[in-house]
Image (cartoon, helix red, strand yellow):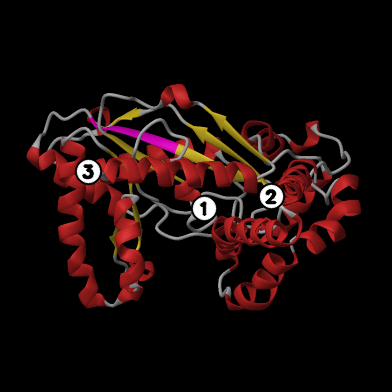
Amino acid sequence: MKNIVYHLIKFWIKTSLHLYYRKIIINGLENVPRDKPVLFLPNHQNALLDPLLIATDCNRKPYFLTRSDIFKSSILNWLFELVRMIPIYRIRDGRDSLKNNEAIFEKCSKLLNHNKSLLMFPEANHNLQRRVRPLSKGFTRILFKTLERNPNLDIRLVPVGLNYLYGEDFPDKVSIYFGKDISLQDLLQEEDPRTTTERIKLKVSEALQKLTTHIPDSDYAETTKKLDAAGADYLDPVSTNGILKNPENHKEEKNVNSGKTLFGRIFKPLFIVLNLPVVLLWKLFVKPKVREPEFTATLRFAVSLLAFPIYYLLLFSGFSFWFGTLIAVATVLVIFIFNLAYVKLS
C-alpha cells in the first residue's frame, strides 16, 4: 500500500513540476547505475525543489536527507517519511541534536548495503549563487560507516548539477546534469581515512564544477554581469563555464536570459485575473513569510501544488451549479490550457 501511495505522490509531484516550469532539461541519465548502491551528490541552490527535481527524474527511488527543522510538524512527518525524506541535524539545530545523526547515518548505511539510493547535498547548505561551495565531510561519514559493514561494496557516487535560469522568478527553466558515476572503491586510501576523505571531496567538487556554472566567490557580481553581456546560457554549464575560462573568445551579445517573452508580458495581467484567488494567497499570505530567498520558488511551487487543484475544483463546482456541467468543464479546461500556455511561452 505504501508503495502505491509513493508512486501516486511521485506522479503528482512530477506532473506538477513539469506544469510549474517552462522547461526541464535532463542530461546524462545513462550515467545512473540501476543495480548498484548510489549516492547522488548535487549542488544545492533552491531548497526543497532541488531534491524533488532529482528524485522524480533520476530513474531510481532515492531516500534523501533533508534539514531536520522541517520535521517539526508532526502532521507532515508521515508524508515526509512516505516520500523517503530523512532528517539530518546541523549545529544550528543545537549541539545536543547532533547525536541524532548517528542513528541517521546507521539507517543510511543499511540502505546502501541493500543496493538502495540516497540523495545528499555535500555543500550542506543552500545558496542561489551560481558556484560550487566547499564540500562538507558529512556524506563521507555515511560512506565509511557503510564500508565498515561491507568493505568491498561497490558504491557509486553520482554528481548532479542543477542549473536554474533564474532561481527565484516564475516561470523558470531548469536543467539537471547527471555526471558520470564515480567508483568509491577507486578513491580509497588504505589506513588513511583523512586522505580518502579529501580525495572523495575533491573528486566530487571537480565533477560538480563541470555540471553547473561555477563562478568563483571573488568578483562574483562583476563576473555575472560579464556572463550576461556575453549571452551566457545558464542551462548549459559546459558553454557557460567555457565563457568563464576564455572570456576573450566571446564577444558581447544580447542577453538571452533577460526578461519574459512578449507573450508573457502581454498576458501576465490576464493570468493574474484568471487565477486571482491563488495569486492573492501567494502574494498576501505566503510570500511575506519567506525568510530566505532560496525558499521563494519552493513555497511558490507548494502553493501551486496544493491550491490549483482546489481552485479548479471550486471553479467547476460553481460553474456547474450556475451554468451546468458542460460549461463548467469547458471553463476549467480553457483556464488550465491558458495557464499552461502562459508558463510554457513566457
Residue named by callout 3: 143
Estimate the x, y position of residue 197 in percent, counting from the top left. Answer: 27, 45
Where does the N terminus fall, quadrant-wise?
Answer: top left
Quadrant assignment, res 189: top left
Q: Residue at x 36, y 49 (%)?
A: 120
Residue furthest left as drawn: 149
Residue named by callout 2: 325
Is 315 covered by the magenta stretch? Answer: no
Is 156 covered by the magenta stretch? Answer: yes
Tell me the crowding category of disc 2: few under 14, some 14 to 19, or many 20 or more residues within 10 angstroms, Cα based: some
Residue named by callout 1: 49
- Looking at the rendering, the stretch of residues picked out in magenta corresponds to 155-159
Which residue type carries mark 1? Leu
Q: Earlier in the sequence, mark 2 or mark 3?
A: 3
Quadrant assignment, res 273: bottom right
Q: Residue at x 68, y 40 (%)?
A: 244
Tell me the crowding category of disc 1: few under 14, some 14 to 19, or many 20 or more residues within 10 angstroms, Cα based: some
